[in-house]
Image (cartoon, rainbow, N blue to C red):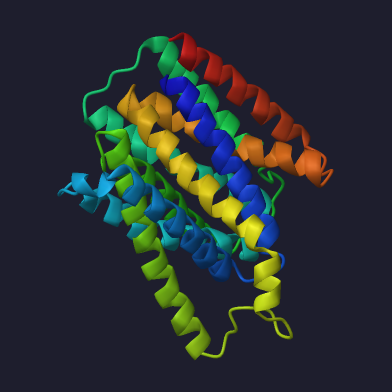
């Protein structure tokens, strides 16, 4: 079950990142984050009311609040780093956030077998290579590296926090709702400050009509991200966190494959090799 839900997480995160990347070509990244999360809040709010999940409120929800505070900062840092580039360096570095939940699992006493340790090592190398790192002296601004590492730590922290925010399925609905409300509060405040400084929330010459036309895509990004957090939490609660974290972090492979299928982007040799290593690591982890 852990492997199944973790791989589902990788697919959902990979597709959400692909969709978010496409949307940021049309509207600002912060607007993408806020609107997609507002859609998620509405849907999750209905689920929480319908299932009575609100009855499971408790101190564990502070983990969800923490995830909600860290998530937008990590996402915006990542988008800013991608803008500074080169993407072939930024993307693989961002996936190193897997180190955070893996370390947390080890601290909490998990001891993977030798085969699983090998699988973790092979999969992490594959994840990094799947992002297509530029190995021939590509210029990298120091700010881009710092922002990427902040994003990586943030992504990993969200994985570690959300897995501690609930113990039941209905409790998970409530935790995800609280996380998303916090996301909207933080992102909305940042968007308000940005517009007060004269930076428009939408491209010049456009208006709500553009946002309405993109709403289905924005909803997909927000709901896929929510579902990914949910499946990751289930994976981490039903098996080793180290396995769940590594398998979930295969999402760069999914993003690369989606770009290949939809945008006809050709996979570089290093990306293809990374995808193969990630698959080999997955087999080792599952077999262990």
Q: Please tell me which residue is depicted at 50% across the width and 35% down the height of the picture.
A: 9
Depth check: 28 or 47 in front? 47
Q: Please tell me which residue is depicted at 44% across the width and 11% down the height of the picture.
A: 115
Residue 152 shown left or right of residue 61 in the figure: right
Residue 85: tell me if it is visible: no
Q: Please tell me which residue is depicted at 46% across the width and 53% down the height of the picture.
A: 43
The quadrant in which the N terminus is found is top left
Depth check: 210 or 4 in front? 210
- Residue 67, compared with residue 3, is above or below; it is below
Residue 168 shown left or right of residue 95 in the figure: left
- Residue 98, compared with residue 73, is above or below; it is above
Residue 236 shown left or right of residue 26 in the figure: left
* Residue 144 coordinates in the image, percent (x, y): 55, 62
* Residue 129 coordinates in the image, percent (x, y): 63, 35
Q: Please tell me which residue is depicted at 45% across the width and 82% down the height of the picture.
A: 192
Quadrant of residue 278 within the rendered picture? top right
* Residue 137 coordinates in the image, percent (x, y): 69, 51
Quadrant of residue 27 within the rendered picture? bottom right
* Residue 26 coordinates in the image, percent (x, y): 71, 68
């Amino acid at each position: 079950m852990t492997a199944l839900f973790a791989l589902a997480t990788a697919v959902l995160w990979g597709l959400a990142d692909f969709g978010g990347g496409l949307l940021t070509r049309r509207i600002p990244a912060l607007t993408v984050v806020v609107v997609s999360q507002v859609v998620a809040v509405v849907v999750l709010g209905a689920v929480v009311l319908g299932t009575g999940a609100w009855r499971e409120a408790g101190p564990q929800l502070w983990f969800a609040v923490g995830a909600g505070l860290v998530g937008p900062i990590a996402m915006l840092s990542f988008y800013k780093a991608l803008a500074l580039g080169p993407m072939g360096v930024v993307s693989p570095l961002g996936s190193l956030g897997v180190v955070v939940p893996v370390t947390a699992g080890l601290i909490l006493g998990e001891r993977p077998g030798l085969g699983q340790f090998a699988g973790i090592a092979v999969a992490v190398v594959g994840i990094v290579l799947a992002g297509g790192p530029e190995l021939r002296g590509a210029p990298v601004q120091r700010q881009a590296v710092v922002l990427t590492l902040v994003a990586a730590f943030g992504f990993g922290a969200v994985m570690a926090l959300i897995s501690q925010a609930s113990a039941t399925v209905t409790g998970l609905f409530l935790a995800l709702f609280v996380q998303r409300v916090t996301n909207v509060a933080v992102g909305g405040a940042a968007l308000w400050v940005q517009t007060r400084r004269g930076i428009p929330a939408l491209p010049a010459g456009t208006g709500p009509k553009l946002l309405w036309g993109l709403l289905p895509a924005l909803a997909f990004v927000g709901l896929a991200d929510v579902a990914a957090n949910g499946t990751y939490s289930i994976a981490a609660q039903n098996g080793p966190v180290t396995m769940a974290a590594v398998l979930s972090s295969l999402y760069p492979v999914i993003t690369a494959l989606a770009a290949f299928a939809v945008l006809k982007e050709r996979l570089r040799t290093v990306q293809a090799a990374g995808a193969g290593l990630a698959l080999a690591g997955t087999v080792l982890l599952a077999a262990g």
